[in-house]
Image: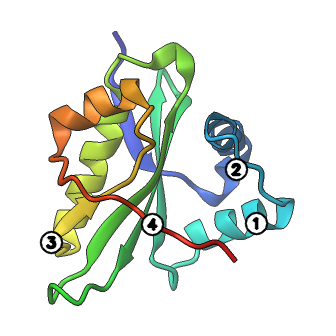
Amino acid sequence: MPKIVVRPLRRDEREAWEPLWQGYLRFYKARLKREVTDRTWARLHDPLEPMHVLGAFLGGRLVGIVHYIFHRSTWTIGNYCYLQDLFTAEEVRGLGVGRALIEAVYERAQEAGASRVYWLTHETNESARALYDKVADYPGFVQYRKLF
């Protein structure tokens, strides 16, 4: 089994990132305007933005992505790290790619002095939740939201 290599994606790697991003959106039955995807990619590479992207590579091929965001909290002096999007190519699921991406976010969050990493997933996403139950605690919170 080839080693999983996780590293920040470069600005010139959008062509490899985009199919995974679109796969993530399809999984959640979401559609975004092109301008949102364009802005997201730009933000992920803007040093003034708190948004970041890592890619997981197997045999030199991008097979997984994770986006994460640092933000302030009223409960700590340091930031929190929100792991916003995590997606792996279907053919590599179960090979440790998702875990490697999560652990890479953990490392970067610790280096940045964040006091926690957290994320959301849909309650029906059983395969992801099986992994999440191994790498994090489920605190039982319920999300509410209002869209505009």
Q: Which mark is residue 36?
A: 1
Q: Residue at x 45, y 77 (%)?
A: 50
SS at badge 3: loop
Q: Which mark is residue 84?
A: none
Q: Residue at x 57, y 66 (%)?
A: 44
Report the Cα–Cα distance between label 3 and label 1: 29 Å
Report the Cα–Cα distance between label 2 and label 3: 31 Å
Residue 31, percent from left and from top: 77, 50
Q: Which mark is residue 144?
A: 4
Q: Work out whether residue 104 or residue 84 is closer to the camera in this orientation and state it.
A: 84
Q: Is residue 98 left or right of residue 146?
A: left
The answer to which of marks 3 and 4 sits earlier in the sequence is 3
SS at badge 2: helix
Of badges 2 and 1, nearer the viewer stands 1
Q: Check the image and report above or below for 83 versus 5.
A: below
Q: Which mark is residue 115?
A: 3
Of badges 2 and 4, nearer the viewer stands 4
Give, as a three-letter code, the residue at label 3.
Ser
Report the Cα–Cα distance between label 1 and label 4: 23 Å
User: How busy is the neighbourhood of tag 1: few (under 14 within 10 Å), some, or many (20 plus)?
Assistant: few
The answer to which of marks 2 and 4 sits earlier in the sequence is 2
SS at badge 4: loop
The answer to which of marks 3 and 1 sits earlier in the sequence is 1
Give, as a three-letter code, the residue at label 1.
Val
Q: Check the image and report above or below for 104 versus 112.
A: above
Q: Check the image and report above or below for 99 versus 92.
A: below
